[in-house]
Image (spheres, grey):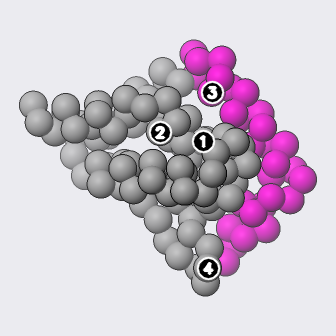
Amino acid sequence: MNDLSDLFKALSDATRLRVMNLLLEAGELCVCDLESTLGCTQTKISRHMRYLKRAGLSADRKVGRWVFYSVASPKSELQRLALKNLRELVKAEPRAARDIAVLKRRIASGCCVGTNQQQ
């Protein structure tokens, strides 16, 4: 039960749920994409990303000074089910849909994900 409890603790914060929603939608985003889409500081995003990474839900890669975040490959059936169900659950949340719309506008205007993802 501890694994399940840890997973739900990681997902118990609204900002972390919003981040996971965006990562599930986009695949990979840099910290500045998350900052501008969610209206959070780099420090706040980085703190939440560390929490998600410790829980095994997110992964990162560095390219120069840029850090790109993505959803981690599930390491257990529990994580796979949680991610699958999370994707479905957030679709019903109006704020999640607004966040995705903001991200899509940012991508269309040339934010980091549109220009740096190929690196």
Q: Amino acid at mark 3?
A: Ala
| Secondary element at image label 4 | loop
Tag in front: 2 or 3: 2
Report the residue at 39% width, 56% height from top.
Answer: 50
Q: Earlier in the sequence, mark 2 or mark 3?
A: 2
Seen at 36% across and 50% down, the residue is 51
Mark 4 vs mark 1: which is more N-terminal? 1
User: Badge 4 is on which residue?
Assistant: 65
Residues in magenta? 91-119
Crowd around label 1: few <14 · some 14–19 · many ≥20 (10 Å): many
> What is the C-alpha distance between the residues marked 3 and 1?
8 Å
Name the amino acid, label 1: Leu
Q: Nearer the viewer, mark 4 or mark 3?
A: 4
- Amino acid residing under circle 4: Arg
Say which residue label 1 marks.
22
Q: Is residue 9 magenta?
A: no
Q: CA distance from mark 2 to mark 3?
A: 12 Å
Residue identified by numbered label 2? 16
Q: Residues within 10 Å of mark 3 (few under 14, many from 20)?
A: some
Q: Amino acid at mark 2?
A: Arg
Q: Secondary structure at mark 2?
A: helix
The image shows residue 14 at horizontal and vertical percentages of 49, 29
Any part of residue 81 in sight: no
Q: Residue furthest left?
A: 1
Does residue 64 lie above or below 15 as drawn? below
Residue holding disc 3 = 96
SS for tag 3? helix
